[in-house]
Image (cartoon, rainbow, N blue to C red):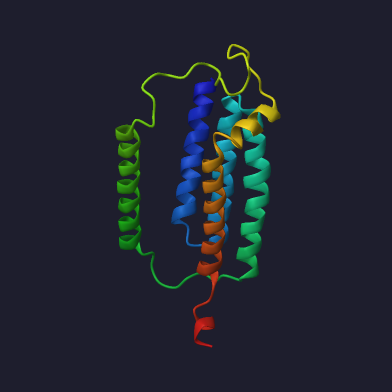
């Protein structure tokens, strides 16, 4: 049953991500993003990563998305005129997949991903690798030492997304005035 639930929430996340990308309405896209973030949190819960699931719901699906919706509502976006630019979207999607494949190939080629499988508990969490801990203190220590760069990259991506929401929501008539 947990495998079926995991597949259900993974499919829900992918469907919501498609809604996010393909929707022409900014508010509908934001709601799709909230649904995708909740689906990721549900997958965290199924993987027994309760702390990450709660953080996902509170920080991303809660605070960050409220900020995005506030900016969208504040800038008063209207429905764009014309048809959806399928050709531009297809080129962007192809570029994304090529860059993603290049990054995966680079990780494999550079040896950044070890060939051996990790043990059940990372040794950084406790002094005794055989002892498992789920405390927030060990998670925070690991997050701000070993995984500091991915944390900073996630913060930068959130900043870029916020600037993108503001720039896409601006009216073209304001530039001419």
21 lies above or below 16: below
Which residue appears at 64% of the width and 52% of the height?
A: 64
Which residue appears at 66% of the width and 31% of the height?
A: 51
The answer to which of 13 and 62 lies nearer the viewer is: 62
Q: Position of residue 150 (x, y in %)?
A: 52, 42
Which residue appears at 35% of the width and 44% of the height?
A: 100
The answer to which of 121 and 57 lies nearer the viewer is: 121
Q: Position of residue 138 (x, y in %)?
A: 66, 27
120 lies above or below 21: above
Which quadrant is the C terminus positioned in? bottom right
Q: Position of residue 4 (x, y in %)?
A: 50, 24
Residue lying furthest top in this view?
Answer: 130
Which residue appears at 48% of the width and 51% of the height?
A: 19
- 169 to the left or right of 71: left
Image quadrant where residue 38 sits: top right
- 172 to the left or right of 100: right
89 lies above or below 136: below
Counting labels gives 0
Image quadrant where residue 116 sits: top left
101 lies above or below 136: below
Image quadrant where residue 90 sits: bottom left
- 99 to the left or right of 5: left
């Amino acid at each position: 049953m947990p495998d079926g639930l995991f597949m259900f929430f993974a499919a829900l996340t992918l469907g919501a991500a498609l809604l996010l990308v393909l929707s022409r309405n900014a508010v509908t896209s934001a709601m799709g993003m909230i649904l995708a973030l909740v689906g990721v949190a549900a997958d965290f819960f199924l993987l027994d990563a309760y702390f990450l699931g709660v953080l996902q719901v509170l920080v991303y699906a809660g605070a960050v998305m409220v900020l995005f919706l506030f900016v969208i509502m504040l800038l008063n976006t209207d429905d764009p005129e014309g048809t959806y630019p399928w050709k531009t979207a297809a080129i962007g999607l192809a570029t994304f997949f090529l860059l993603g494949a290049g990054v995966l190939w680079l990780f494999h080629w550079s040896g950044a991903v070890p060939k051996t499988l990790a043990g059940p508990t990372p040794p950084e969490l406790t002094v005794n690798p055989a002892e498992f801990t789920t405390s927030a203190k060990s998670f925070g220590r690991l997050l701000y030492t070993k995984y500091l760069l991915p944390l900073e990259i996630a913060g930068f991506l959130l900043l870029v997304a916020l600037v993108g929401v503001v720039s896409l929501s601006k009216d073209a008539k304001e530039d001419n005035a």
